[in-house]
Image (cartoon, rainbow, N blue to C red):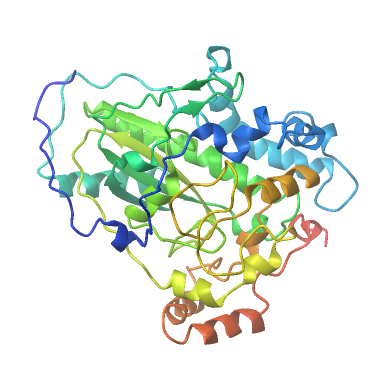
Amino acid sequence: MPSGVPLPVLPADPRDSDAAAGFAIGPDFVPFAQRNDVFRRSWWDPAVRSPKTERFYQSHGDLGAGVRGADGFTQRDYALRNAAWHVSDQFTEARRDDDRREGFTDPYTQLRPPAAVRVPFDSPEAAAREVKRVARAFGAGDVGVTARDERFMYTAKCSDLTGTERPVDIDPALRHVIVIVMPMDRGLLATVPSALSGAATGLGYSHDAMTLLSVAQYLRNLGYQAVPSANDSALAIPLAIKAGLGEYGRLGLLINPHYGPRLRLGKIFTDLPLAHDAPRGFGVRAFCNECRACADGCPVKAIPQGAPGDPPPGPSYIKGIRKWTVDAEKCFGYWANQGTDCAICIRVCPYNRDYTRRGARWWRWLAGTRWRRVALWVHRWSGGGRRVAPAVWWGRG
C-alpha cells in the first residue's frame, strides 16, 4: 500500500440527502442485481433474447447483419457507427478469455499500480478542484464528486458470456466517487432513428473509456487507489444526481444543465479524500411535469405519460423508488427491431440544445421558472427536436 498522509474521515454533508437529490425511496427498496438489467437479460433470458436481438449484436461486428437500403442504414452508416465503437470495444473485449467485458459488466483493469509514495493535498476541497481540472483536460464535459452509496451498488455483477453472477470487486474502502459526464455529438443524434446516429453513442463510450482510464491512472500516479467504471458495478444516474450533475427526467435519463440528456456517464471509485458536491436542481422535474415530448415521440410508447410512480412489474425495474420508469422491454425491443440503438427521446427533448449559444441559455433559464409553459411553446414553435435526414449529415441532401 502507498505510504504518506493518512486518509481523513470526512463528515457527512447534510446537503447530500435523498430529499436534496429528489429521491423518493421507500422502505420496500431493494438494491438492483445487474443480471436483471435488460441488456444483460438479452444475453440469457429467453423473454428478451430473440433472433432480432442476435442480429442487433451481430451487426456490431458483421455489417451484413444490419445493412439495408434505407437512408441511415447503409453500409456507410454502419461503418461509421462501428468505427465509433472501436476504441470502447477494444477495452471491452481485451479480457474476454477471462470472462470479463470491461466497461459493461466489469470495471477497467488496464492500469499501472499506484505509486509507492502518496502525494498529499492541502484539503479535500483542493483535491476535488484538481481532479475536476484534470478530468476536463482529459475530455470530460462535466464532473462532480459524491460519496459511495451502497444502495446503488449492484448486489452482484453478471457475466454476459457465461451468465455467472459474481461479487462486485471494487474495494469498499474506495469511498469517494468521481462522476464524469461525456457529451454525445448533437449533429449525429439529430439523425435518429438511424444506424448513423448510433455513432454518437459509440463515440461517447470510446471517449468515456479514454477519459476514465486517464484520470484513474493520474490518481494512481499520485499514490492513490482508483478504479474506473462505466456501466458496471453501480447505477450511474443516482450517483450523478448526488454529485450535482443534473436532474432525473421523464425519459429516464439524467438531464445535465450543459448538455441536457445528450451524454454518457462514467465513474471512478477512489480513496483520495475529496470534497463532495451537493445535488442541484434547475427546474427539470417541474418542466417534465408539463412536457410530454419524449413520451409522445417514443414509437413504442415505452415512456410514461403520467406522474412519477411505482415501477411496473418485471425484473428490470428498481423496486421501492417512485420515479418515471421507462418500459425496458419495449425500449430494447425497438432497438432490436431496427438493428441499432434508439435515441429519439434524446433528440426530441427540449433540453437537448447547444448551450454555447446565448438563446439556449436564455431558454434554459425560462424553463426553470413559472413561465416554463412559455419555454415549451417556444420549443414547439421553433421546431425543436426535428429529425435531420442522414443524407443531409453526409452532405448529400
Q: In the image, 189: left or right of 136? A: right
Residue drawn at (54%, 78%) of the image: 290
Between 186 and 320, which is closer to the camera in this rendering?
320
The number of numbered badges drawn on the structure is 0
Vertically, is 259 above or below 266?
Answer: below
Residue 250 in which image quadrant: bottom right
Residue 195 in sight from this viewpoint = no
Which quadrant of the rendered structure holds the C terminus?
bottom right
On the image, the x and y values in percent for residue 16 come to: 25, 55
Q: From this viewpoint, which residue is outermost toward the front?
A: 28
Q: In the image, 373: left or right of 51? A: left
Residue 187 in which image quadrant: bottom right
Residue drawn at (33%, 60%) of the image: 21
Residue 345 in sight from this viewpoint = yes
Q: From this viewpoint, which residue is outermost toward the right?
A: 69
Which quadrant of the rendered structure holds the N terminus?
top left
Residue 325 in which image quadrant: bottom right
Q: In the image, 38: left or right of 264? A: right
Residue drawn at (76%, 31%) of the image: 54
On the image, the x and y values in percent for residue 8 come to: 10, 37
On the image, the x and y values in percent for residue 369 come to: 41, 82
Vertically, is 108 above or below 339?
Answer: above
Between 238 and 223, which is closer to the camera in this rendering?
238
On the image, the x and y values in percent for residue 289 come to: 51, 74
Residue drawn at (59%, 49%) of the image: 313
Between 252 and 98, which is closer to the camera in this rendering?
252
Vertically, is 66 above or below 285?
Answer: above
